[in-house]
Image (cartoon, helix red, strand yellow):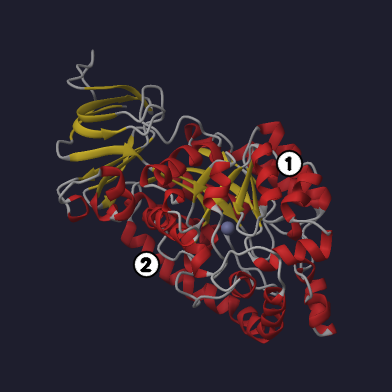
Amino acid sequence: MSLLIRNAQILTLDAQDREWPEADILIADGRILAIGPGLCPATQPARVIEARGMLAMPGLINAHFHSPGNFLRGMVDGLPLEVFMLYEVPPLAAGVPVKRLNYVRTLLGAVEMLRHGVTSVMDDAFHVPVASAEGIDGIAEAWADSGMRARLAIDQPNVVEYEKFPFLADLLPPEVKAGMAAAPRQSTAELLGLYDHLVSRWDGAAGGRIGAALSCSAPQRVTVDYIQALSVLAARHDLPFNCHILETKLQRVLGEERYGRSLVRQVHDLGVLDERMVVIHAIWIDAEDIALLAASGATVAHNPVCNLRLGSGVMPFRGLRDAGVPICIGTDEAVADDAINPWAALKMAGLVHTLADPDYRSWPTAPEVLRCMMQGGARALRWPDIGRLEPGARADIALLDLDTPPFTPLNDLRRQLVFCEPSSAVRMTIVDGRVVFEDGRVTTVDEAALRAEARELTAGYRAAFAPAIAEARRLEPYYRTMVLRAHARDVGLRRRLDA
Ligand SMILES: [Zn+2]
């Protein structure tokens, strides 16, 4: 399938940051063949898209996302991560049939992102209470059918709930601890078997549009043999390895209590911190952590809306950038950045760091955060051919109407992309050379039927989870005590307004 986009204003975001006031983009077999004014293809393209008055730019890359949160938007008010997770992944939840649920739930988020001009995503998908091949297939099939480019990981902790936190084992009554110890957990061998399934069935599927990724969730949530086995697997297949590290102050305290060191130092000492690792959040890091991250070549995934929603704190953006650490941007999940809108994450990345330093020369600029999303995102996903428009790159393109409020009047394209929240101006989304969103509708999915089925499934899902949620409410006071105790400690870092 060949495609010719004619007369668009083009923002390439390539290494030279080239722009074209008006030019054409020729696409064939999922890749960009040529960019320039007045292109005359040797053979007539299958479709010509007249794009005068439109901006063509690379599709957005959502580098950190959990599709299982898609049914949970707006479910809770702001809560600290550890309390929030009680409701998001209730520790005593029973299983529900997952194949269709996972499929519909994932597709719902895909549709929303395609409407925003998002073309690639890293889905760090968790499973409650345990992962299964059919649950993984439900998610992967949805990404494949959506037309989006996606990498999928299995984010499955395998230690007892109260071992993931400081103080909790001492706070909980014995009968609750016994219930947690008896909750289902998967062995390293079992989880590696599921990774075999994911990699062999899905890595490179849909013409290379679907890929596998690794995830340990977080170092304190898994056994040492499992995190090390995942790292070996990531190296063997050269895949991204997702790891949430130092998202909260409590996790800083946990590192001190459990390991006598920071969790960044911990993954470094375990031999798993390398250039394939995507270190998610990295808020409560110190100077030594930043040096370790820089030396490793890891990419940090910044989720500023989620971080504010959960009161986690502000990531040291400039410290990481000055040390040369690549940063990508994500929305995290729909219960912690409820709109699944990377434009909002981009804007928040451009805003929140003004709180960190009175010297405004250190504040992120619009071109800088755009580059984080594109180049950082491509690096995190280990797909070097996305995030820029140039010959040879994948044809993942968003077309935005410049005759719209966010761009009127047009003063500075990059600043208006970052600060004017232009998702309402997205007119077309192209992934791998295929038009997947145009004329206000996603072409790969019956959206109304999808939403209807999502509503129907949610009712059953809520009912199935009601006992676990009731149990979570009962547990909340213990978690609250734990969180407040951790926050009372001086860890020598300032990442929130209060500490
Ligand atoms: Zn996350």
Q: Residue furthest front?
A: 359
SS assignment at label 2:
helix
Which residue is at the front of the view, 81 or 195? 81
In percent of width and height, residue 254 lies at 76, 65
Label 1 sits on residue: 231
Residue 62 is at least partly visible in this image: yes
Rounded to the nearest angstrom, the CA distance separating label 1 from label 2 is 40 Å
Q: Residues within 10 Å of mark 1 (few under 14, many from 20)?
A: many
Q: Residue at x 37, y 53 (%)?
A: 343
Question: What amino acid type should be assigned to the residue bearing mark 2?
Answer: Ala
Residue 105 is at least partly visible in this image: no
Quick check: 19 above or below 346?
above
Q: Quadrant of the N terminus?
A: top left
In percent of width and height, residue 340 lies at 42, 59
Q: Quadrant of the C terminus?
A: bottom right
- The first of marks 1 and 2 along the sequence is 1
